[in-house]
Image (tube, grey):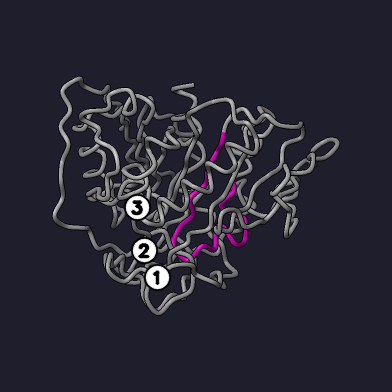
């Protein structure tokens, strides 16, 4: 059942003395030796990507056609993700073809013409094609990103930002870049960017936002600010979507660190931290900044991260943010529609 909560004028700032330790692995066959979201064990700059060759279609399945204004029920065609429990490796044993979900390496209809060259300083280090569109991999302000250059010169109208799952297979193999989102965003001159996590778990080099701390949130915000400057982005509010570890990062430290720098409409899919930390601005004293940030949760009630997702929803609601949540009955970790509710939540405010 979807619910949306309007912000209240009387919001209070919480301080937290604990950080939720969670395992967040969105890679379909995560090979990480350590997937504990240990806040003391994060390391900067993972250097290799997940070697999974079997991306799941469950992360971006659009079979439900769910609208946040109604209820969601996991359909029989949803691919169920298996987990070994909170605090351990989380693997997705689905062998579904990601092209069936509209989010994999499908060909799609190629764009007419071609994208213009990125602005000065944004060299396309490694061009690639995904869903019939040309993309670039580059390093901006010390962080690796993938983005889809616009078909017209700057300015870009808005940033659309993808925060991948732990292990990064959805980023590395591109299947996390939903074709539905690309086809909706790019024709509007929205610049779609995927950010590779600058953090990894101890003993691992795979990029994992579940290991990210406030320092990493600052790094991501700095990179996005560089895009805003280079592309003369018109709209102040970015559109964010995360999955699993990327959603944990969103609710734990990214909004606390960057909500006043790169505000936006955040959709946290199949993940939440339950607690936030590292605040660099004060929501109770900044109602104008709170008004620029919204948080929507999209998760299954059988997800091992269902409880912290609900807790994040409650925390941000209490602090006065515009919030909403869509809970899929019977759905396990990320085994429900991702791109459909994400688009619906965004469009509900635009």
Q: What residue lies at 64% left-to-right and 47% top-to-bottom?
A: 147
Badge 3 is on which residue? 248
Quick one: label 3 or label 1, which is nearer the N terminus? 1
Q: Position of residue 333 (x, y in %)?
A: 37, 55
Whether residue 61 appears in this view of the structure is: no
Question: From what the image shows, is residue 276 above or below residue 85?
Answer: above
Q: Are marks 2 and 1 in contact (CB under 8 Å)?
A: yes
Quarter of the picture holding the N terminus: top left
Q: Nearer the viewer, mark 2 or mark 1?
A: 1
> Horizontal placement of 143 versus 285: left or right?
right
- Magenta range is 159-177
Q: Position of residue 280 (x, y in %)?
A: 30, 43
> Horizontal placement of 150 versus 341: left or right?
right
Q: Nearer the viewer, mark 3 or mark 2?
A: 2
Label 1: element kind: strand
Label 2: element kind: helix
- Give the number of the disc on residue 18: none
Whether residue 30 appears in this view of the structure is: yes
Badge 1 is on which residue? 43
Q: Position of residue 172 (x, y in %)?
A: 59, 62
Q: CA distance from mark 2 to mark 1?
A: 8 Å
Label 3: element kind: helix
Dot 3 crowding, Cα within 10 Å, few <14, some 14–19, many 20+: many
- Give the number of the disc on residue 211: 2
């Amino acid at each position: 059942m979807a619910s949306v909560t309007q912000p209240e004028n009387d919001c209070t700032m919480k301080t937290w003395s604990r950080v939720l330790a969670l395992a967040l692995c969105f890679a379909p066959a995560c090979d990480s030796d350590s997937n504990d979201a240990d806040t003391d064990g994060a390391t900067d700059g993972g250097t290799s990507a997940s070697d999974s060759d079997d991306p799941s279609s469950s992360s971006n399945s659009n079979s439900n056609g769910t609208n946040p204004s109604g209820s969601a029920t996991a359909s029989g065609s949803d691919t169920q993700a298996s987990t070994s429990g909170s605090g351990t490796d989380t693997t997705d044993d689905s062998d579904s073809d990601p092209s069936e979900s509209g989010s994999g390496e499908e060909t799609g209809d190629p764009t007419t013409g071609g994208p213009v060259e990125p602005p000065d300083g944004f060299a396309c280090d490694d061009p690639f094609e995904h869903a019939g569109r040309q993309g670039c991999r580059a390093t901006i302000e010390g962080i690796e990103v993938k983005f889809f250059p616009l078909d017209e010169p700057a300015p870009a109208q808005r940033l659309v930002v993808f925060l991948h799952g732990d292990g990064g297979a959805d980023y590395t193999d591109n299947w996390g870049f939903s074709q539905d989102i690309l086809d909706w965003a790019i024709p509007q001159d929205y610049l779609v960017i995927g950010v590779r996590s600058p953090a990894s778990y101890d003993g691992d080099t795979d990029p994992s936002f579940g290991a990210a701390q406030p320092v990493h949130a600052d790094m991501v915000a700095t990179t996005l600010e560089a895009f805003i400057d280079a592309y003369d982005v018109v709209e102040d509010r970015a559109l964010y979507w995360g999955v699993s570890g990327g959603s944990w990062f969103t609710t734990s430290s990214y909004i606390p660190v960057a909500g006043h720098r790169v505000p936006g409409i955040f959709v946290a899919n199949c993940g939440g931290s339950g607690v936030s930390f590292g605040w660099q601005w004060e929501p109770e004293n900044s109602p104008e900044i709170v008004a620029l940030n919204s948080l929507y949760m999209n998760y299954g009630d059988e997800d091992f991260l269902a409880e912290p997702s609900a807790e994040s929803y409650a925390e941000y609601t209490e602090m006065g943010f515009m919030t909403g949540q869509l809970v899929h009955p019977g759905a396990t970790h990320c085994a429900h529609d991702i791109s459909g509710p994400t688009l619906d939540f965004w469009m509900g405010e635009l």
